[in-house]
Image (tube, rainbow, N blue to C red):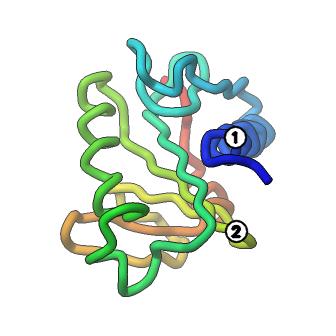
Amino acid sequence: MANSRQKGRLGETKLAKILSDYSGLEFTLVPGSGSGKIKGDITCPNASYCIEVKSYAETSITDKMLTNSSNSIIKWWPKIVSEAARMGKIPLLVVKYNRSKWFVITNHPPISAKFMYLSSPEIYIVELMAWLESDKPKFNT
């Protein structure tokens, strides 16, 4: 069984491949998992997004989202917003739970995909592939 670091790294690697396949860009893991100048977990050349990846056993996309103190989108979001702002990038949080699809958390309303809206903080939660197809995000400047 993988420890939490291995699981996180595996999730980052899988997401980097998904985004590379989608965009044709080369997404790579950020050295030191964002502890250096480049923040976030994965990046691509001339990145427009600061991408943080979270892989957990259980979902926090439930009513517990507002009260859970550990694996909570509410807890993670301010950190990625702050890191993205320091780099002049758009914050993007991507989460996956055991046996689930990938989900994107963004502060921009999705164009046509179905989404969940949370007013505090103001975020939109949408399934990754639906978001890629509807919003067609440009990952580099």
Dot 1 crowding, Cα within 10 Å, few <14, some 14–19, many 20+: few
- In screen coordinates, is 115 left or right of 103? left
Residue 6: image tag: 1
Residue 22 showing in the rendered view: no
Q: Nearer the viewer, residue 9 or 17?
A: 9
Residue extending furthest top?
37
Q: Nearer the viewer, residue 113 or 37?
A: 37
The x and y percentages for residue 92 are 44, 46
The x and y percentages for residue 53 are 54, 46
The x and y percentages for residue 118 are 29, 74
- In screen coordinates, is 71 left or right of 127? left
Q: Considering only order in the chain, which callout, 2 or 1, is on the residue closer to the N terminus? A: 1
Residue 135: image tag: none
User: Which secondary structure lies at badge 2?
Assistant: loop
In the rendered image, which quarter contains the N terminus?
bottom right
Up the image or down, 79 lies above or below 129; here it is: above
At a point 38% along the width and 67% down the height, the residue shown is: 124
Up the image or down, 129 lies above or below 47; here it is: below
Amino acid at circle 2: Asn
At a point 30% along the width and 65% down the height, the residue shown is: 69
Residue 76 showing in the rendered view: yes
Distance, label 1 to label 2, CA atoms, is: 14 Å
At a point 64% along the width and 62% down the height, the residue shown is: 102
- In screen coordinates, is 9 left or right of 75? right
Dot 2 crowding, Cα within 10 Å, few <14, some 14–19, many 20+: few
Up the image or down, 135 lies above or below 92; here it is: below
The x and y percentages for residue 106 are 39, 56
User: Which secondary structure lies at badge 1?
Assistant: helix
Evaluate if marks 1 and 2 touch, with contact meaning CB atoms under 8 Å apart: no
Up the image or down, 129 lies above or below 117; here it is: above
Amino acid at circle 1: Gln
Residue 98: image tag: 2
